[in-house]
Image (cartoon, rainbow, N blue to C red):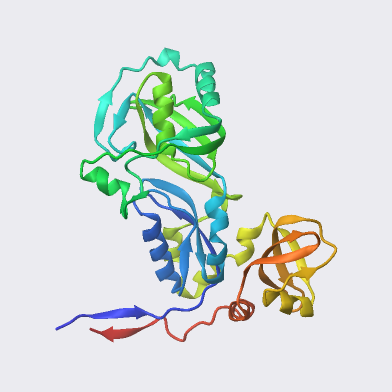
Amino acid sequence: MNASRTRVQRRPVHGVFLLDKPIGLSSNDALQKVKWLLRAEKAGHTGTLDPLATGVLPLCFGAATKFSQLQLDAPKTYEALVHLGATTTTGDAEGEVLQTWEVDTQALTSENLAAVAARFTGPISQVPPMYSALKRDGKALYEYARAGITLEREPRAVTILHLTLSRVEEEQAYVALKMTVRCSKGTYVRTLAEDIGQALGYGAHLRSLRRIETGGIDLSRCISLQTLEATPDAERLQTVLPVDTLLAAHTRVTLDGDNAGRFLSGLRRRGEWADADAVAVYGEEPPALLGVAHIRARELIPDRLLSPVEIQQILEGTPRPQASGILETS
C-alpha cells in the first residue's frame, strides 16, 4: 500500500528573502527549502555559497529573479578562519591533509601580516581550485577532482577591495589567522587563503567561512532557516522583503500614468534626467515598481521590466490559498 504524501499548493511570491545560510547546506538546497516553506512558484539564488560556508544569501522569488544578476555581480565581504601550517586536498577543512609545517608564531607580527595583506590587495590573479563548480566539457571540476584527475586551469583576474589579517590568540590545536576580505565576484576565498599561507612560508586552508555582506545587504537583516521554520505558515510571507530591496543603489525615477504605460511596453521616454547607469523606475498611480533602466542623453531606456501580471499581484498582495496543501495518494 502506497503511503500518502502532502503536495504543496504553490502560490505567486514576489520579493527577496534574506537568508543566513546554515553550514552543511548547498545554496540550492537552502533555496529549495525556503521555496517549499513559502510555497513559492518561482525562485532563484544570487550566487553560491559552499556547504562549508554560512551567512548572507539573498533568495529571489517571482519578479525579483529578474534582478538577481545585480547581486551576482556585487562585491562581497567575508570573515574566514585560516588554518596556517597545513594544506588539504580541497583547500578547506573538509579535505584530507596533504602536508604540514611547523609555524614560527613569533614571525606572525601585525606588521608582517599587514605587509602580506597589502600584497594581495587590489587586482590579483587566481587559479580556480579543482574543487569548484566550474564546468569543463559539461562536468564540474570537482567531479574530475573526486576521480583523481587534475586539469590545467587558466588564471582569472579578480579584485581584492579590502583585506585584513590578524592572529587568533585563543588557544587552538593549530595556528589560526582571522581574515576579513571584501572582494569582487568570482573570487575564491579558499584559494586566497592558500596563497596567503604560501606567502607567509607555510601551507594553509580554510577552517570556516562566513559571508557577512553582499551588495549592501548585511547579516543584521538576515533570517535563519530555523526561525523561518518556526514561523507560522500564515505569517511567513511577512519575512519576504519587496522586490526593490535589490535596487537600493539605483537612481529612482517616477513616471505618470501615460508614460508608465508606454515604458512598460518597452518604449523609451524623454525627460529632464541626468545620465545614469542604474535606474529603478516606478509608476506614480498606482505606486509600483515597473522595472530598471538606464538614462542616456535624457532618454530613459528600459532594461528589465516587470509584467503587468506581476505588478498586479504585488499591488494586491500574494493570493493565499484556502488550505496549505492537499493530501494526495500515490
Q: Is residue 267 above or below residue 152?
A: below
Does the image show residue 242? no
Is residue 316 among the parts visible in the rendering? yes
- Give coordinates of residue 298: x percent, y percent: 81, 62
* Residue nearest the observer in this picture, 240 or 216: 216
- Place of residue 145 in the rendered image (x, y in percent of width and height, measured from the top left): 26, 43
Q: Is residue 290 left or right of residue 180?
A: right
Q: In percent of the image, x 59 and y 81: which residue is there?
A: 309
- Of residue 270 and residue 116, the one placed in the foreground of this image is 270
Task: Work out which quarter of the rendered image holds the N terminus and state it.
Answer: bottom left
Q: Position of residue 259 (x, y in %)?
A: 77, 76
Q: Quadrant of residue 123?
A: top right
Which residue shows up at 31% across the image and 17% down it?
Answer: 102
User: Residue drawn 52% across and 71% down?
Assistant: 62
**Closest to the observer: 194 or 219?**
194
Estimate the x, y position of residue 278 in percent, counting from the top left: 68, 57
Q: How many marks?
A: 0
201 lies above or below 326: above
Question: In this view of the protein, which residue sits in the foreground, 311 or 10?
Answer: 311
Task: Describe residue 126's horizontal placement relative to residue 70 as left or right.
Answer: left
Q: Is residue 31 above or below residue 237?
A: above
Q: Residue furthest right?
A: 272
Residue, x 51% and y 77% (percent of image)?
A: 12
